[in-house]
Image: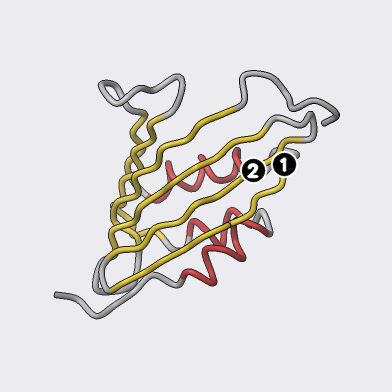
Amino acid sequence: MTSITLDLDALRHGLEGRDAAAVTALYDESAELVSIRRDAPPGAPHVLRGRDAIGAHFDDLLGRDATHVVERSVGVPGTAAIVESCRYADGTRVLCMATFDVNTDGRIIRHLEVSAWDDEPAPNG
């Protein structure tokens, strides 16, 4: 068993600071991100492979006009999990729960996330 953990502070600062490069740096070159969401159900998840593809995802995601808050995080050697809430400028809210498998270098090798969106923006933004 590995004793290496994910740097959860760096992940939180990257997400909340909308710093795609900082978040992407936490991933291994051959990492995989599996996303379950409204347009990618469990039977056909959205899968990204490799740090470059994952980096492009975070460039897009963190480049949007939205706030990101890591509400909870937990890590033990080899794995970690977070709960992240997001709010777009139009009031739409997103909640994401993610788990991370970490290699012996402390980099993410597998990221599994499940996200849920408001169907419509929240009343009063």
Specify the label residue 66 is tagged with.
Answer: 1
Local packing at callout 2 (Cα closer than 10 Å; few below 14, some 14-19, many 20+) is some
Q: Is residue 62 left or right of residue 23?
A: right
38 in relation to 110, above or below = above
Rendering coords of residue 26 (x, y %): 44, 63
Q: Nearer the viewer, residue 122 or 94?
A: 122
Specify the label residue 80 is tagged with.
Answer: none
Q: Which residue is rendered at x = 66% and y = 53% of the image?
A: 18
Specify the label residue 86 is tagged with.
Answer: 2
Instruction: Give the amino acid at mark 1.
Output: Ala
32 in relation to 22, above or below = above
Of all residues, the one furthest to the left in this rendering is 1
Disc 2/disc 1 C-alpha distance (Å): 6 Å
Rendering coords of residue 75 (x, y %): 37, 69
Dots 2, 1 in contact, CB < 8 A: yes
Of all residues, the one furthest to the right in this rendering is 124
Q: Which residue is rendered at x = 65% and y = 50% of the image?
A: 68
Locate the N terminus and report the quarter of the image it occupies.
Answer: bottom left
User: Which scheme is used to colour this image of the protein?
Assistant: secondary structure
Instruction: Give the amino acid at mark 2.
Output: Cys
Q: Which residue is rendered at x = 73% and y = 24% of the image?
A: 121
96 in relation to 75, above or below = above
- Mark 2 lies on a secondary structure that is strand
Rendering coords of residue 115 (x, y %): 47, 35
Q: Quadrant of residue 105?
A: bottom left
56 in relation to 7, above or below = above
Locate the C terminus and report the quarter of the image it occupies.
Answer: top right
Of all residues, the one furthest to the front in this rendering is 123
